[in-house]
Image: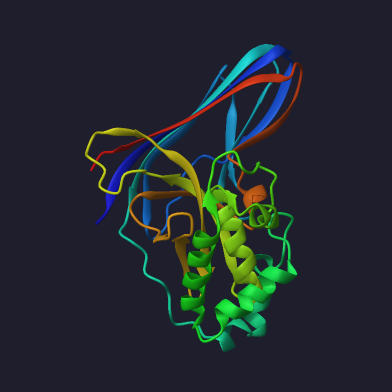
Amino acid sequence: MSWRVRVVHTTGYEYESPVVQSYNEARLTPRGDRRQNVVVSRVETSPATRAFRYTDYWGTEVTSFDLHAPHTELKVVASSVVETSSEIAPVTTGTWQDMREENLVDRYTEFLEPTRYTPRDRELVSKARELKKGNSPADAVLAASNWVGEQLTYQPGSTGVHSSAVDAWRERKGVCQDFAHLSLVLLRAMGIPARYVSGYLHTKEDGALRETVSGESHAWIEAWTGGWWGYDPTNAIPVGPRHVWVALGRDYADVAPLKGIYSGGGATALEVTVDITRLA
């Protein structure tokens, strides 16, 4: 079953003293693909700015804008209407021999290598070997993702935006970012190309039409096992109509929703809200 959803993502900053210059990048625009159609999308700022869009190396649409007039507040509102599709079934055509093919390893090497957020860890490599044994690549993806869901307790505030998968593993708790990063560590240790996906999740499985819910910025993974397919290790569910994807990359660093630099007073408040409405 497909859904049509409206997403309104608002981010607000306040500054101790006027900011005289700021340069920003927003990765807040959903992308269209075989399972998702973007009906309309826009990013607006207050104060108003002149913005331009480009597609980054990973295929994510970036809205870049800068401000040169003194300001003490900045608000960024991203609004989208997106049609999503039904659950994505695992791609089961890939074999372990395929995973070792030189051309495939060369093509997807960036999704096989460790990163700062997904470092190599001896204990996790050993666990990856254990989860891989006796499974096909697709089954190994599910085994690893579900194992992460069993091991980590979802607890907001237990980790920070700069925490790595190993940090979360040691704490045995984290948020969706950590669930995704830990799953990526295991899959890459198995030799399965895997990437980080950011987006949104409608929080109600059977969302009522026209009901607006407080949604979430969310993260999940995609694995290549003969083709790319997504799985949500935080909720132990396939990616489906409640998921709206925005950006992908090696880890969180490639998909941060809003980042930039500025000259002026320190930020004293940060407001982030995500409102999601199922329209059809």
- The relative height of residue 153 versus residue 258 in the rendered view (above or below) is below
Residue 191 appears in the rendering? no
**212 left or right of 172 in image:** left
Q: Residue at x 69, y 21 (%)?
A: 267
Residue 115 appears in the rendering? yes
**248 left or right of 265 in image:** left
Q: Position of residue 269 (x, y in %)?
A: 62, 20
Q: Residue at x 50, y 61 (%)?
A: 150
Quadrant assignment, res 101: bottom right
Residue sitting at the far right: 263
- Nearest the viewer among 5 and 96 is 96
Q: Residue at x 51, y 65 (%)?
A: 145
Q: Residue at x 40, y 50 (%)?
A: 243
- The relative height of residue 23 versus residue 122 in the rendered view (above or below) is above
Quarter of the picture holding the C terminus: top left
- The relative height of residue 185 versus residue 38 in the rendered view (above or below) is below
**172 left or right of 147 in image:** right
- Nearest the viewer among 5 and 208 is 208
Q: Position of residue 210 (x, y in %)?
A: 24, 34
- The relative height of residue 137 versus residue 60 in the rendered view (above or below) is below
Q: Position of residue 170 (x, y in %)?
A: 68, 56
Quadrant assignment, res 215: top left
Quarter of the picture holding the N terminus: bottom left
- Nearest the viewer among 180 and 197 is 180
- Nearest the viewer among 208 and 130 is 130
Q: Position of residue 205 (x, y in %)?
A: 30, 49
